[in-house]
């Protein structure tokens, strides 16, 4: 599981759902939740939260251009690659934090990933869980 | 409002320990006492019913003193008017279903109450049967009806469903909840089933070694802080298998076996038999209608 | 023929009176014994079981001593209640109650102990008094044990010999019960009469026990 600590900077919500913006350092990431500030007390601007997302939900892209709907983009550097027969785990450095992406080994080959490469890591907002320790 | 403070010496499997619990339950509230066996949950419930006496304690119910060891007050269980459901049902074998309910009536009660309860719980067809001819689920429904027949001021449920299989347990949970709402009665259930606590209780008190260590809504207590995942289940790990750079976990959730994929850092701190919570976003699951 | 039926009628009168009194004393006593936590419980249980192991003559001997007009207990009974128990029907009843006590108390106590505690607890929270619980919940659920205990006590009294001989002697119409009569007739080589008493006792005992087994098979075990 990937974890990034941040603070809530904005909350958009309707009666059942919220789109929560969380600042991690200088960048802002989003999570869509089936909660609202009424149902979850921790949803307050300024609260510290941890973004959780699964390794298998992290998409990697090289030389990404054009428009994309994904809100969560991380500019990262490849630290290491552990190759498996079908899947590979790619460890990434994001401003000192380590993230892991598990993609197919074919994908690693197609992107010709190597240690030290600068790539983009992408996560859909609805794959991000917010955790709050009171 | 029930206020209780109980201090009693208990003899557990690992020697003596103190049951030292304080609890407050509001009128009409449904509260669960949750924890592993042998931590004093049942004893606490029995003290509330008057079936056991603590060395020191104080119980007041709506201002009326049931127990005050300092003043030498200890109201007999006969006078407390509680409805109690036992794990072994405790139906009187010599009486029919109807007989059990009639025996429970208060001396001044209207006999019609028995028929109303039999109708309400759809036990009419079984009313002339003896308990030994009933299934476990039927017995416990009779026990619930009997507890309510005595017009109790609170309902104490001592792991009433633990001897039943999963499907019947779920149906009886619905039944208990329905009747608790119908009569607006305060209820306290002892349970070690997270699902049951979630379903029935508005508030859960977690007991460990004789004391209440945590309490709150089931979500707040069981989700350890707050996590925004909506799709969450607790279960036990049956097996951990490596596959490529990931791991496959086989987890028993209730009576279902599920398999999930976990990364190395998730697996590192886990071993077979550990209790885990599986959390997913509410967006992920696809919903397929099943044929009847 | 009437003089021949006398000992048999006396035997059944003795057994009936003994069993009725024993039931009234023994069942509450068994309940108390099943629930008590007093320290000397093992000693009490041992006392109750003594008649199972003692030769009847030992008990009969001590009872005879106690009942005799020379003994303070016998004098006290005579003075207070006008009872002379030695060589009387009343004495036989008292001795038989003591002697058959374990035969009733043991099965009934065991049955009380095997009833789930929750039955008692359930009745208590339903507001029922001790006596309501005893008569409506506990007793009806130990029927098989009550029946076996009663019948065993009855049958045992019918068959008692040594203790009766010691404290009752052989007074026709008073203490000459069937088992004594058999011994007496054999002594006087009157085998036909002995055979008559023995045969009746044999057949009746068998029928009584048969009844117990048949009924206990039909009455489902209350707490199964």
Image (spheres, coloured by chain):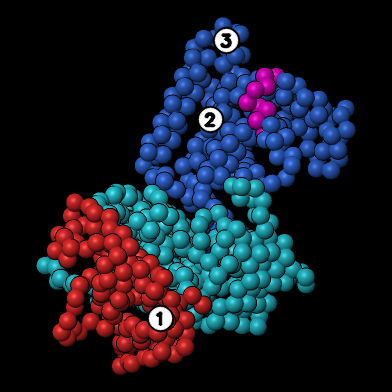
Q: Are marks 2 and 3 on the same chain?
A: yes
Q: Position of residue A1 (x, y in %)?
A: 35, 65
Chain letter for the part of the structure drawn in blue: C
* C112 to B213, vertically: above or below: above
Q: Badge 1: few (under 14), some or many (20 or more) residues near its Cα, within 10 Å? A: some
Residue with the most extreme left position: B291
Horizontal side, residue A60 vs residue B166: left or right: left
Q: Nearer the viewer, residue B269 or A99?
A: A99
Can you identify the residue that label 1 sits on? Answer: A24
Q: Which mark is residue C155?
A: 2
Q: Colour of chain A?
A: red
Chain letter for the part of the structure drawn in cyan: B
Q: Residue at x 61, y 47 (%)?
A: B14
Q: Residue at x 31, y 72 (%)?
A: A76
Q: Position of residue A52 (x, y in %)?
A: 36, 72
Output the chain of dot 1: A
Q: Secondary structure at mark 3?
A: helix
């Amino acid at each position: 599981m990937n974890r990034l600590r941040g603070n809530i900077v904005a909350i958009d919500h309707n009666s059942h759902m919220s789109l929560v913006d969380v600042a991690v350092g200088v960048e802002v990431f989003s999570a869509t939740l089936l909660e609202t500030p009424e149902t979850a007390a921790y949803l307050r601007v300024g609260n510290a939260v941890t973004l959780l997302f699964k390794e298998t939900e992290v998409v990697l892209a090289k030389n990404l251009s054009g428009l994309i709907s994904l809100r969560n983009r991380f500019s990262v550097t490849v630290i290491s690659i552990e190759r498996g027969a079908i899947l590979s785990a790619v460890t990434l450095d994001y401003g000192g934090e380590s993230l892991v992406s598990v993609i197919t080994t074919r994908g690693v080959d197609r992107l010709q990933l190597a240690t030290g490469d600068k790539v983009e890591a992408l996560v859909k907002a609805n794959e991000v869980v917010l955790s709050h320790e009171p | 409002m029930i206020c209780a403070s109980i201090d009693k010496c208990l003899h557990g499997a690992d020697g003596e320990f103190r049951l030292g619990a304080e609890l407050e339950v509001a009128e009409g509230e449904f509260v669960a006492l949750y924890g592993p066996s042998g931590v004093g949950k049942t004893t606490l419930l029995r003290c509330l019913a008057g079936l056991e006496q603590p060395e020191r304690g104080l119980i007041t119910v709506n201002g009326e003193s049931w127990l005050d060891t300092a003043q030498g007050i200890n109201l007999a269980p006969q006078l407390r008017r509680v409805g109690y459901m036992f794990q072994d049902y405790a139906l009187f074998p010599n009486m029919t279903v109807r007989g059990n309910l009639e025996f429970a009536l208060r001396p001044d009660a209207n006999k019609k109450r028995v028929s109303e309860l039999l109708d309400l719980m759809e036990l009419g067809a079984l009313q002339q049967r003896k308990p030994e001819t009933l299934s476990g689920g039927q017995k416990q429904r009779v026990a619930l009806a009997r507890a309510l027949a005595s017009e109790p001021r609170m309902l104490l449920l001592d792991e009433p469903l633990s001897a039943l299989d999963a499907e019947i347990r779920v149906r009886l949970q619905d039944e208990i909840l329905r009747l608790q709402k119908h009569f607006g009665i305060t209820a306290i259930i002892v349970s070690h089933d997270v699902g049951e606590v979630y379903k029935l209780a508005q508030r859960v008190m977690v007991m460990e070694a004789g004391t209440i260590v945590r309490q709150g809504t089931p979500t707040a207590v069981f989700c350890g802080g707050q996590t925004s995942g909506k799709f969450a289940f607790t279960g036990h790990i049956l097996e951990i298998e490596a596959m490529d750079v990931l791991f496959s976990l086989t987890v028993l959730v209730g009576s279902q076996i599920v398999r999930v994929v976990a990364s190395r850092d998730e697996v590192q701190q886990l071993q077979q038999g550990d209790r885990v919570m599986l959390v997913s976003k509410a967006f992920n699951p696809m919903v397929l209608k099943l044929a009847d | 023929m009437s003089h021949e039926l006398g000992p048999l009628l006396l035997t059944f009168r003795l057994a009936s009176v003994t069993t009725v009194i024993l039931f009234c004393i023994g069942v509450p006593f068994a309940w108390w014994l099943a629930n008590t936590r007093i320290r000397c419980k093992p000693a009490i249980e041992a006392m109750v079981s003594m008649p199972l192991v003692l030769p009847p003559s030992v008990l009969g001997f001590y009872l005879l001593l106690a009942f005799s007009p020379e003994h303070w207990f016998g004098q006290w009974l005579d003075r207070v209640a006008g009872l002379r128990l030695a060589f009387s029907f009343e004495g036989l009843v008292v001795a038989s109650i003591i002697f058959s006590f374990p035969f009733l108390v043991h099965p009934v106590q065991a049955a009380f102990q095997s009833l789930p505690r929750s039955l008692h607890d359930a009745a208590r929270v339903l507001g029922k008094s001790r006596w309501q619980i005893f008569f409506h919940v506990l007793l009806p659920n130990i029927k098989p044990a009550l029946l076996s205990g009663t019948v065993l006590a009855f049958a045992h009294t019918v068959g008692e010999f040594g203790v009766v001989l010691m404290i009752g002697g052989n007074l026709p119409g008073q203490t000459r019960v069937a088992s004594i009569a058999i011994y007496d007739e054999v002594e006087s080589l009157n085998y036909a009469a002995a055979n008559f008493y023995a045969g009746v006792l044999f057949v009746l005992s068998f029928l009584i026990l048969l009844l117990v087994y048949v009924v206990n098979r039909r009455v489902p075990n209350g707490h199964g």
